[in-house]
Amino acid sequence: MKEYMKLILDYNRSKIFITALKLDIFSHLEDEVDSDYIADKLSLDRRNTKFFLNALSSSEFIIKKNNKYKNTYKSDKYLNKSKKDYMGDYILFREQMSSLESLDKKLLKKEYKKINDGCDMYDFYELAKVTRKEMFFGKVQNILNLIGKIFNKDQKFKVLDLGGGSGTFAIEIAKKYKNSQAFIFERDNVTPIAKEIIKNENDSDLKKRTHILEGDFNSDEIGKNYDFIIASGIMDFAGENIQSLSDKIYNSMNKKSYVYLVTHGVNENYTKPEPAIIGWLSGQINGLDILTCERKIIDSFFEAGFNKIEKLDEKEGFLNSYLIHKD
């Protein structure tokens, strides 16, 4: 019974946390202040603000001492808009993206409109924008370390960031490996982010070696003669195109080349991992067929002709990473 009651507490804690983010309360708690200061600064009710800050403190998002409030170290680092590691926009976007508001009504409804394209439901431009900073908390370094084990520093090679969003992986590889050619394949409504990042780089050589390709990787050609392809979090959403996409990747690559695959690790029962199943439920319940079990993804690469798949020891939350070989 205790675990069920804890669910209610966790639900309310998350509501309090998200409300504080939406009101930008953490940006005003870098220094110790009283509740009236916050209320007046943000045009809130003084009495209710005091109770709300007490609740934030109870959940250890902030600290209360001598009737004054202040961020914890982590809250100030990641939730204060004035700090370089601010992740509030990313958290709010994820919360909105995975929201299960009116879930009961969705279940009672007898009909729904099937959605074939995730772009009809999700704002991938905004997703690419808010996730860029998060990628530097380990993901970028992981892929640079992997590249360093495969290619020499001065070696010429051609890399494709497939469904690359902001293009961060490809751009960072091109920065470090001066003889590489980096390609970012993404939909035309998302590519302005990568274009802007490249434009703002103070490196004319980097700009010459970094290229944008626009299209839908499920239906369009993705280029050829690649030595390294990044398929991070995209194969899970290929659906009925999973085999044709794996074939397309294989045929676009040189001999002795590699695919860096990141999956959601979905099991064959579609019940685990919990963050993936619950996180994408909002899309599924609204008519979008998303998520592919990991076994099916792996099998599609073998079927395409790849001869070796090794699981990498770089756990990013519930995600799994693989290095796939084409000899």
Image (spheres, rainbow, N blue to C red):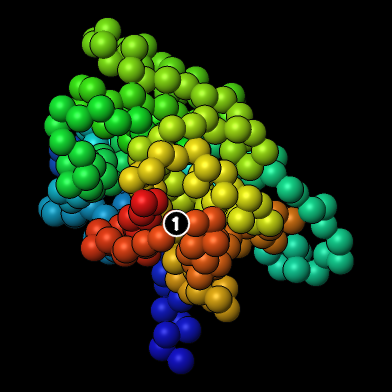
In the displayed structure, would residue 239 be above or below residue 197?
Answer: below
The residue that appears at 50% across and 47% down in the rendered structure is 250
Evaluate whether residue 245 shows in this view. Answer: yes
Q: Is residue 315 left or right of residue 278?
A: left
Q: Which residue is mark 1?
A: 306
The residue that appears at 26% across and 44% down in the rendered structure is 143
Could you say where residue 232 lies in the image, as x and y percent from the top left? Answer: 42, 48
Residue that protrudes farthest toward the top in the picture: 204
Q: How many marks?
A: 1
Q: Is residue 267 left or right of residue 88?
A: right
In the displayed structure, would residue 128 be above or below residue 103?
Answer: above
Label 1 residue SS: loop
Question: Which of the two residues, 251 or 182, is positioned nearer the viewer here?
Answer: 251
Crowding near the residue tagged with mark 1, few <14, some 14–19, many ≥20 C-alpha atoms within 10 Å:
many
Question: Which of the two residues, 3 or 121, is positioned nearer the viewer here?
Answer: 121
Could you say where residue 234 lies in the image, as x and y percent from the top left? Answer: 51, 48
Looking at the picture, which amino acid does disc 1 mark? Answer: Phe
Q: Is residue 32 left or right of residue 23?
A: left
Residue that protrudes farthest toward the bottom in the picture: 1
The residue that appears at 30% across and 31% down in the rendered structure is 157
In the displayed structure, would residue 119 be above or below residue 190?
Answer: below
Could you say where residue 22 lies in the image, as x and y percent from the top left? Answer: 44, 41
The residue that appears at 36% across and 20% down in the rendered structure is 210
Question: Which of the two residues, 197 or 205, is positioned nearer the viewer here?
Answer: 205
Question: Which of the two residues, 239 or 106, is positioned nearer the viewer here?
Answer: 239
Could you say where residue 186 lies in the image, as x and y percent from the top left? Answer: 53, 31
Evaluate whether residue 317 shows in this view. Answer: no
Residue that protrudes farthest toward the right in the picture: 110
